[in-house]
Image (tube, coloured by chain):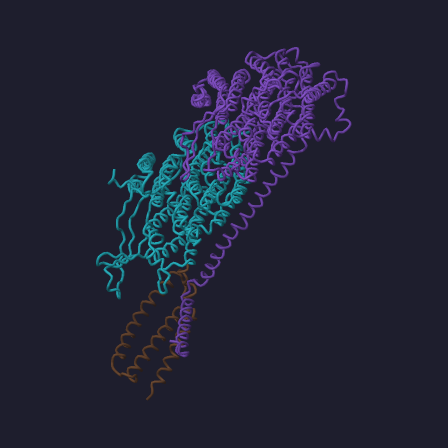
Chain colours: A brown, B cyan, C purple
Amino acid sequence: MSITPYLTLAAILFCIGLYGALSKKNAIIVLLSIELMLNAVNLNLIAFAKYGPKPGLAGQIFSLFNITVAAAEVAVGIAILINLYRNRGTTDVTDMDTMKR
Amino acid sequence: MDKLPLLTLIAFTPLLGALVLLFVPKQQGRLIKTIALIATLIPLVLAAALYAAYQASGDPVQFKEMYSWIKIPLNKEGLEQITSFFFEFKYNLAVDGLSLPLVFLTALVSAMAALASFHIKKRWKTFYICFLLLETGMFGVFMAQDLFLFFLFFEITLVPMFFLVGIWGYLDREKAANKFLIYNGIGSAIMLIAFLIIVATVGFTMTQTNNEVILSYSGDIHQIAHNLFQDPNAFVNQAKPNNPFFMSDTMKWTVFLMLLVAFGIKLPIFPFHTWMLRVHTEAPPSIVMIHSGILLKMGAYGLIRFGVLFFPAQAKEAALLLGILGVINILYGAALAVVQREFKLVLAYSSISHMGVVLLGLAAFNTSGLQGAVFQLVSHGLISALLFLLVGSIYERTETTELGALGGLAKSIPFMSGILLIAGMASLGLPGLSGFIGEFLAFVGMFGTYKAVAAVGALGIILAAVYVLRGVLSITFGPIAAQYAGIRDARLVEAIPMITLVAFILLLGIYPSVLSEPLQQTISGMDQLLHSAAGHIGG
Amino acid sequence: MANDFTSYAWLVPLFPLLAFLVLIAAGRQLREAGAYISIVAMLASFVLALLIFFERLGHTTDYTWNQLKWLTIGDFQLNMGFEVTNLNALMLVIVTLVSLLVNIYSKGYMHGDERVNVFFSYIQLFSFAMLGLVISVNVLELYIFWELVGVCSFLLVGFWYFKPEARAAAKKAFIVTRVGDVGLFLGMLLLFWYMPGHSLDFSAIHNAFSQGKIDPSIATWIAILVFVGAMGKSGQFPLHTWLPDAMEGPTPISALIHAATMVAAGVYLVARTMDIFQASPDAMLVVAYVGGFTAIFAATIGTAQNDIKRVLAYSTVSQLGYMMMALGLGAATAGIFHLFTHAFFKALLFLGAGSVIHAVHTQDIREMGGLAGKMKITAWTFAIGALALSGIVPLSGFWSKDAILSAAFEHNQLLFWVGLIAAFFTAFYMARLFFLVFAGKPRSDAHAHESPAPFTFPLVVLAVLAVIAGFVFTPFNGWLGHWLGDHAEAETANWTVMILSTLAGLLGIGLGYVMYGKNSVSRDIVAGNAPWLYTLVYRKYYIDELYDVVFVRGLRLIGKAFELFDIYIVDGIVRLCSAAVVGIGRLGLRLQNGQVQTYGLATLLGLLILALALAGRRFFHLG
């Protein structure tokens, strides 16, 4: 079994995520896209852990960490988004430009 | 008297005053003004003592105070034979014949300006804190004997000045303050780069004693002068390959021109003058007294101390350029002063014209020219301070200084009109008043070097008469407008600084020896330096 | 003989200075006392000057004291002090005497003016400066006082500061003389560099130039530049325009400053530095021709003026031209002699004019007339002054004018005829003035009456002097020339010159009499037949207009052009720089739009470029 299909899949996932994160207007979708990129990373980690030059458990454990952190991140992110929605009545990221002012 | 750190006392009394002011409630206007006045009068008394105690003969650099201040050890990896290798800036104050009169001038004009500031209308506390900070900065500039210290004090003057113009000025004050800060900031930046180059090359010294070898970078101006001119073995003078400390002629020219621009902005030399017009018109008059009276002199002082005295050969080669710049300043400023409709602008352009005389004296590169430059600095400091003091007092009464709107004030305010006439006469170089001596010496000097340049510059003397008389007579002579018929003449608090300044202007004009005596040692030292530099060019 | 009084000559200028300080300090409290303080101070000066003068009579060596360390320039020391030569002693007497008389006169003339003490203080300052000028020991000291008298003249011309004309006249007086002063200034600088040992002392100048130590071409430069200074002060063409305008000042001032003393300072300066001029024949020629031209030029203008003081002012310009001409011809004694006599009779004329103005309250001679009956003393003394000025035997003016004309006759025939014609015009305008003012019928119904004693006393004294002052130096008595050390002038009576000059004077008076006294020849004979000529002379050859166009407007134009340059080019470049910075900033601002996604994209692009660059390095084996 070769590592290439895994890496290809991960790259495709990452690019889709990146595209979504940079171009989508809806903040929820942007958040989802970021999750997609993270999962692409997880896929890479596991693939390298299994088929890489030095196979071992570290990569798999690290991906577990990653999933946890991602979950936490989504939780915080969604919480912020909900609050923002309550305050400003929008989930459109182009409206979230308070940093400019 | 020996051990008393007189210079430190002079320089930091104002700062102390500012600290005291911090603890005074801001409603206590009278108390604040009194404290501020005392904080400027003490340095004045001390500066007078300093002037009296200064020995006209012997080593011109006197009242030295030197303490090690910032000493950074440097990495001496690979230099095993070296005992220590460091970077040192000293707290190093002293005065010589060049800075002594300017220190006294600073003390005098500051005290007078503090008195004149009594009628400012708002935020006295902040005003006087800024004012006193500014004074400390100015003292430091004229006393510092270390490049780093000089730069530090130089910058200290910028910040309070920015606020003084920006908060207490007239309508367009913020623009003026910004312009001031940007121009001078650029000047300071250029100066800093030039200083860094100097410290990194000339400032590098190797001292060998019995079994110790010490390498150091230093900003001490005497060390630098020593390395440049007296020590042929100094690194800076050795044109060996791979000697990063060697200063080639190109490099010297670059640094000299950088200093010329940096201090030229302050002086100001055409075409860097437009910022000071705005400051002259927008800043409160008592601050313009300081600005025109002292801050402009810092430019000339720096140019002499660092530009000319560090790079005499270059300066000497650029003498014609300096002379022509001086003449341009004189005539350009004078021609513009003739057509201004606002008295403050007349004075601003006349300052440009008068600073041209300083350049002219410098460019002469002989004793009388240099002495003329110093005389002109001091005299213009007194005269422009007096003129702006009057402008402030007149503006307070008439709320305008437009020449067309005023007239006949000699009827309602004869005392102030008389003083204005004296100030005007001093400004146009009437013998018997201080302005003449500077002009005379500068022109004598220039006449010995470049006759044609001096002759063209002498046209400025005629133009000075035209613009001064036009300005002064439009204000004081002629029929008086009805609304000014009832205005009151000078109050005591205004009359005191006026009379004091007039007294000094007269003293310098009638008996210039008071200033020329302490100058001699320094001037002849400078002259020798310039001559030996000229020898280098010839050889 | 000892120098008992001479060594105290420095006190002569000091008395007026003290009076000035007292007047300035005490000012308004003094009231009437101000005038008396001034008079006493001047009297003290006059007495001392007189004592010095008599002490000098037997002397030929100069008394010099210059020990006051004034300024150090390197290893060169500039000292101040005072010097009494015979010429100086004579000048001291002239100045103190005229000043004393004018002080007395002013007490009457300025009576009732609320700033009378200011007026007296200015006169004292002027006297101080003028006396200081006279006894100056070196050129710089002279220059200092030279400027100071200029300022006093300025102050006094503008004494009635609320009058716009006075303001303009004062300004003009200062600026025009300043043009000349710059010449003197430059001349002084040249002297400084070319004199051995940088000495500016008159004695050193005398030595250096009379021994030919200075290159003649340099001497020419110095002489011309010094002469430019003298031109400004002494109202020589083309710098004469300020002097007639200066008549806006109070009349005693016109007598003191603008007739007798300050304007003569130019002549004095040239006489004092005669050695420089004698080292350069070209410069002498310039002086002579400028003087001669001014003499005739101003005399013609004088014939067409209607303001009593302006006529006298142009007459002064013309007479100063005479003096300059004499100096230029090498006849220094004649020039100084004319200065001496002129001081008396011209001061007399001005004071007389003041008396008239005081009585009729106008200065226009067309509105006067028939005053001789009402103002006997004024009329008689004025007549004496006018005759002296016209050069009628045996009044003082005759002898001094004769001395000048005979010098011209010997050296330069052209200038002799110029001088003679000028003498004719002089006599003519004085006759016109006298007959219009004092003869005929009153043309206005002012109740004129003789002026009080403070007016008439100085008039009488001056009239006496105007009669007798000439006898110190006649062709039959060359005492003055010897005393002033001018041995070259062994005067012999030149009867041709005497007769011609008397004829010219009589002819002028006669023509004036028939035109204005008897009215047998129409007054409008010139104005009617050649109106352009009359207008040309009446408008003073349009010199003022010319200066206005060329210098005043020219300067303003240059100033305006520079101002535009300053605003749009110099400041424009500055604004351009700041605009460029702001523009770049704006560009950067557009990226900072607050959109995280844009930032992300930029980061991504940056990362890509970095990665590509790294890959590229690898690829091209540059690492």
Q: Residue furthest left?
A: B211
Image quadrant assignment for residue B396: top left
Q: Is residue C587 above or below residue C147?
A: below
Q: Quadrant of the N terminus of chain B?
A: top left
Specify whether B470 is left or right of A52.
right
Q: Specify the quadrant of the image occupied by residue B249.
A: bottom left
- In the image, farthest residue toward the bottom: A1
Say if C188 sits above or below C161 in the image.
below
Q: How many badges with numbers are in the image?
A: 0
Q: Position of residue B507 (x, y in %)?
A: 41, 32
Q: Residue at x 47, y 60 (%)?
A: C584
Is C595 placed above or below B11 here? below
Assign the C terminus of chain B to one quadrant of the image. Answer: bottom left
Q: Residue at x 78, y 27 (%)?
A: C529
Query: Percent x, y for residue B150?
Result: 35, 49
Pinpoint residue A33: horizontal percent, then vertical percent: 38, 73
Asked if residue C31 shows in the view, the reply is no
Nearest the viewer among C412 and C33 is: C412
Q: Is residue B407 visible?
A: yes
Above or below, comparing residue B495 to residue A91 in the picture? above
| Near-viewer residue (B494 or C359) | C359
Left or right of B395, for residue C439: right
Q: Is B505 or B526 nearer to us in this picture? A: B526
Q: Name the spot of residue B486 as percent of width and height, x first.
A: 48, 27
Front-most of C165 and B482? C165
